[in-house]
């Protein structure tokens, strides 16, 4: 395939990608979305990465480059476009997952978090008492208390994960 045919094909892919990204809201992301080998951009919005792709495409269209450099850049562009297409196609899923909890779920979630906080405080208290326990019987009783509290903490964290998991599934077609 000639270089101009590759450029033309990339231009069509880039136009489709622009439309795809424009259709999806650009969800907030705290960290860069892609590996630094693929994109130099450190932004968090899809539009930031699209801008880099467009700049690379303009560089590819510049005829002053040698053939080997153009081939590498074309391959790199294909990888960047494919990565952006995948990311854009998952935006709707990410938005659903990041939606706030419903009031009953939020209340339950807060209850579990408060219970977790109290359990952690109780565990810390028992560990301090165990370090200063004077008798073996007292140490054994505190150790048994710690095991019980750690079991409760594990169940509490499991309940927290269940609420988070249920929230991440909300809005998916198979739940309706």
Image: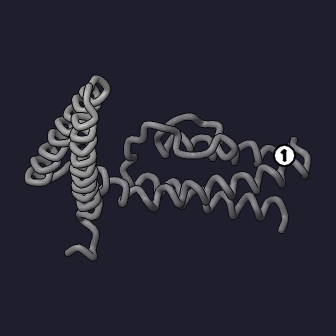
Q: How many marks?
A: 1
Residue 142, horizontal then vertical, whole percent: 23, 38
Viewer-proximal residue, 2 or 108?
108
Residue 33, horizontal then vertical, whole percent: 52, 45
Image quadrant containing the C terminus: bottom left
Q: Is residue 175 left or right of residue 50?
A: left
Residue at image position (27%, 47%) is 147
Check the image and tell me how it is coloured: one colour
Viewer-proximal residue, 172 or 39?
172
Q: Where 16 sits versus 27, above or below? A: below
Viewer-proximal residue, 129 or 137?
137
Image quadrant containing the N terminus: bottom right
Q: Where 127 sits versus 86, above or below? A: above
Mark 1 is surrounded, within 10 Å at the Cα level, by few (under 14), some (14 to 19) or many (20 or more) other residues, namely few
Residue 154, horizontal then vertical, whole percent: 28, 51
Viewer-proximal residue, 96 or 127?
127
Residue at image position (91%, 46%) is 66
Residue at image position (49%, 46%) is 46
Q: Is residue 111 left or right of residue 134?
A: left
Name the residue beneath numbered marker 1.
63
Residue 25, horizontal then vertical, whole percent: 36, 50
Mark 1 secondary-structure assignment: loop
Q: Is residue 80 visible?
A: yes
Q: Is residue 54 visible?
A: no
Residue most toward the top? 132
Residue at image position (27%, 76%) is 174
Residue 16, located in which quarter of the rendered image? bottom right
């Amino acid at each position: 395939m000639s270089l101009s045919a590759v450029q033309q094909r990339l231009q069509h892919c880039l136009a489709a990608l622009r439309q795809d990204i424009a259709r999806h809201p650009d969800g907030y992301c705290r960290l860069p979305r892609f590996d630094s080998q693929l994109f130099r951009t450190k932004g968090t919005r899809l539009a930031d990465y699209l801008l880099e792709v467009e700049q690379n495409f303009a560089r590819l269209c510049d005829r002053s480059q040698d053939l080997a450099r153009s081939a590498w850049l074309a391959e790199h562009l294909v990888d960047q476009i494919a990565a952006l297409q995948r990311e854009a196609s998952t935006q709707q899923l990410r938005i659903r997952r990041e939606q706030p909890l419903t009031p009953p779920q939020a209340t339950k979630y807060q209850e579990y978090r408060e219970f977790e906080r109290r359990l952690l405080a109780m565990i810390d208290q028992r560990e301090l008492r165990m370090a200063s326990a004077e008798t073996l019987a007292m140490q054994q009783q505190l150790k048994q208390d710690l095991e019980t509290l750690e079991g409760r903490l594990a169940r509490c964290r499991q309940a927290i994960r269940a609420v988070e998991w249920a929230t991440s599934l909300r809005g998916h077609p198979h739940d309706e």
